[in-house]
């Protein structure tokens, strides 16, 4: 059985708004965005650093840790934002935020598991089912998988069509009853509660139907493509 690459601990400097710099220690998969440091030993977020910089508002609460791979988070502009659906489809789509909100709305409550061990319980997600998007694009018979591309390059991940059709899989535009906040992937993120969080691509802007799935960001770094909680190599 494959051994997952251990996430590296990065110590770096990141430019924040208004020219402030803050050193960031990210423990685990991904990078903590602008929240001060997470100590590997205690797992606690050191809030004073963030508070001193006036960043308390983006320090994650209720158990979330904010992960990014790029140096800035995408910013949502409803006037220009589009979700494009392409690849092996009969009809490519370019959906505005209003178009997405007009699709059938579904809601589910689930626990969110990061492969590094943190869990957020009873998260309410509201959004659209992937098949409700796909029926307008009409995937061809050869389309067996979907690549979800984040506007935070180079983050992406993939699901089979069967996985994407699981009843609790959503493209979510609300988190706990409010529009998905910027740091959680505004305006749209993938949610697949039966798999570890790295599958749940934030800032989704493009879905490509493909015949051969590609490895996602963390899969290229050793994690299983099928990231079932408790039944994959990150467990
Ligand atoms: N675009 C993007 N999506 C991402 C990530 C990321 O770094 N960039 N990290 C993933 C990982 S490993 C986890 S656990 C969750 C964390 O979600 P949160 O940042 O909303 O807490 O987002 C996932 N989706
Ligand atoms: Mo994660």
Image (spheres, rainbow, N blue to C red):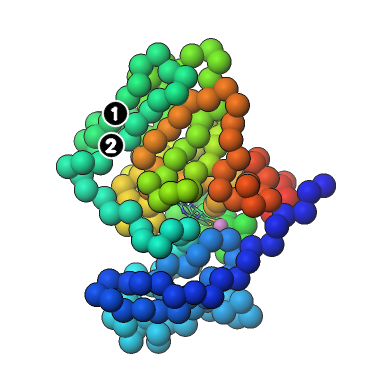
Image location (x, y in percent) of residue 101: 26, 36
Whether 231 is drawn above or below 104: the answer is: below
Image height of 48 relative to 167, above or below = below
Residue 72 in the image, given as x and y percentages of width and height: 36, 61
Asked if the residue under mark 1 is in contact with the one under mark 2, i.e. CB atoms within 8 Å, the reply is yes
Left or right: 28 in relation to 167 = right
State the residue at coordinates (60%, 71%). Answer: 9
**Residue situated in front as seen by the camera: 25 or 107:** 25
Q: Residues within 10 Å of mark 2 (few under 14, many from 20)?
A: many
Secondary structure state at the residue bearing disc 1: strand
Residue 82: assigned label = 2
Q: Which mark is residue 172?
A: none
Residue at image x 45%, y 54%?
123
Taking the image as shown, residue 99 lies to the left or right of residue 143, namely: left
- Where residue 22 appears, as percent x and y from the top left, is 40, 79
Residue that appears at 60% across and 65% down: 28
Q: Label 1: how many residues lie within 10 Å, few (<14), some (14-19) or many (20+)?
A: some
Q: Disc 1, ligand 1: is the CB inside 8 Å? A: no
Q: Is residue 154 in view? A: yes
Helix or strand or loop: what does disc 2 sit on? loop
- What is the C-alpha distance between the residues marked 2 and 1? 6 Å
The residue at which mark 1 appears reads as: 94
* Residue 4 locus on image (x, y percent): 72, 54
**Considering only order in the chain, which callout, 1 or 2, is on the residue closer to the N terminus?**
2
Q: Residue at x 48, y 58 (%)?
A: 69
Q: Quadrant of residue 79?
A: top left
For the view shown, which residue lies furthest in the right direction? 1
Residue 33, above or below 83: below
The quadrant of the picture occupied by the C terminus is bottom right
């Amino acid at each position: 059985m494959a051994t997952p690459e251990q996430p590296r601990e990065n110590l770096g400097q990141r430019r924040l708004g208004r020219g402030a710099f803050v050193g960031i220690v990210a423990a685990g998969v991904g990078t903590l965005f602008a929240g001060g440091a997470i100590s590997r030993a205690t797992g606690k977020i050191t809030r004073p650093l963030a508070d001193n910089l006036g960043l308390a508002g983006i320090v994650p609460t209720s158990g979330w840790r904010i992960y990014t791979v790029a140096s800035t988070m995408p910013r949502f502009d409803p006037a220009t934002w589009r979700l494009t659906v392409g690849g092996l489809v009969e009809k490519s789509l370019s959906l505005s935020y209003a178009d997405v909100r007009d699709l059938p709305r579904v809601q589910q409550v689930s626990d969110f598991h990061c492969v590094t061990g943190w869990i957020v319980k009873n998260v309410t997600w509201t959004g659209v089912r992937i098949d409700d998007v796909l029926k307008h694009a009409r995937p061809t018979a050869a389309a067996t998988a979907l690549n979800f591309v984040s506007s935070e390059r180079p983050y992406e991940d993939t699901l089979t069509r069967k996985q994407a059709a699981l009843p609790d899989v959503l493209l979510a535009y609300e988190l706990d009853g409010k529009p998905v906040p910027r740091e959680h992937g505004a305006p749209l993120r993938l949610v697949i509660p039966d798999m570890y969080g790295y599958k749940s691509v934030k800032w989704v802007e493009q879905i490509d139907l493909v015949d051969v799935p590609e490895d996602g960001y963390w899969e290229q770094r050793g994690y299983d493509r099928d990231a079932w909680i408790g039944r994959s190599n990150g467990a």
